[in-house]
Image: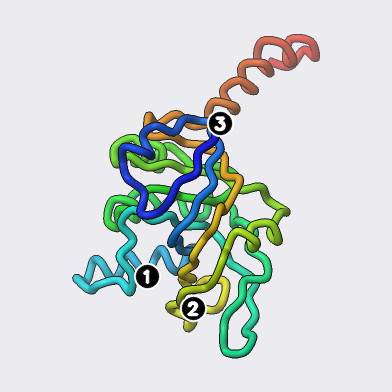
Amino acid sequence: MEYHLNTPLKEKDVRKLRIGDIVYLSGLMITARDAAHNRVLKLLASGEKLPLDLNGLAVYHCGPVVRKLNGEWEIVAAGPTTSARMESYEAEFMEKTGVRMIIGKGGMGSRTAEACKRLGAVYTIFTGGAAVLAARGMKRVVDVKWLDLGVPEAMWIIEAENFGPLMVAIDSTGANFYADLKRRVDKNLMEKVYPKIGFK
């Protein structure tokens, strides 16, 4: 199925999504990698407010390439960062911020899958190597926070327009595309490949 969704995302809409569904996203989204995830959690733990209410938004694992023209930021390229880097943060990040969609590449683990199930969220993937296509779905830079972390690690607040295609890789039932694929590959190795080559 193909869906065109707008942020802030509603739980009922996110819970309709299933592995393999394609999503195009419009509205506010943010970029956040390791350093931004860490800062968000530290600020919330100390009782401070975030610069933006993230409830219902999407967080994109991305360190964009940007330039400034006539005083305005422009996204030049915005390919996804490998999401496994954020696995240790993501469940808590989702719970404490209320984000409903994670965007990245390469899959995430069981803690994130469990959080998606419990909180009504999804993990989606954007094709690696298509950074210019990603930038086309970013209508404008609304703001940027925490440039002291460096351009790739800062929190970029983006107005998206039909950003995608995004494929659902973890849905709100906790089903995980990459984990399922690994199980199938392992089963084929054990039952079909290893016996043929005499590997035990």
Q: Badge 3, how many Cα within 10 Å: few under 14, some, many 20+?
A: some
The tag on residue 153 is: none
**Looking at the image, which residue is at 71% across and 61% down?**
132
Q: Earlier in the sequence, mark 2 or mark 3?
A: 3
Q: CA distance from mark 1 to mark 2?
A: 10 Å
Q: Earlier in the sequence, mark 1 or mark 2?
A: 1
Nearest the eye: 123 or 24: 24
Side of 42 relative to 129 (left or right): left
- Percent position of residue 78, x then y: 63, 63
The tag on residue 149 is: 2
- Percent position of residue 143, x then y: 46, 77
Residue 175, image quadrant: top left
In the rendered structure, are the residues bearing label 1 and label 3 in contact, judged by CB atoms less than 8 Å apart? no
| Residue type at tag 2 | Leu
| Residue type at tag 1 | Arg
Badge 3 is on which residue?
20
Is residue 167 visible to us here? yes
**Looking at the image, which residue is at 62% across and 71% down?**
75
**Looking at the image, which residue is at 55% across and 51% down?**
104
- Element class at badge 1: helix
- Element class at badge 3: loop
Q: Badge 2, how many Cα within 10 Å: few under 14, some, many 20+?
A: few
Residue 46, image quadrant: bottom left
- Percent position of residue 131, x then y: 68, 59
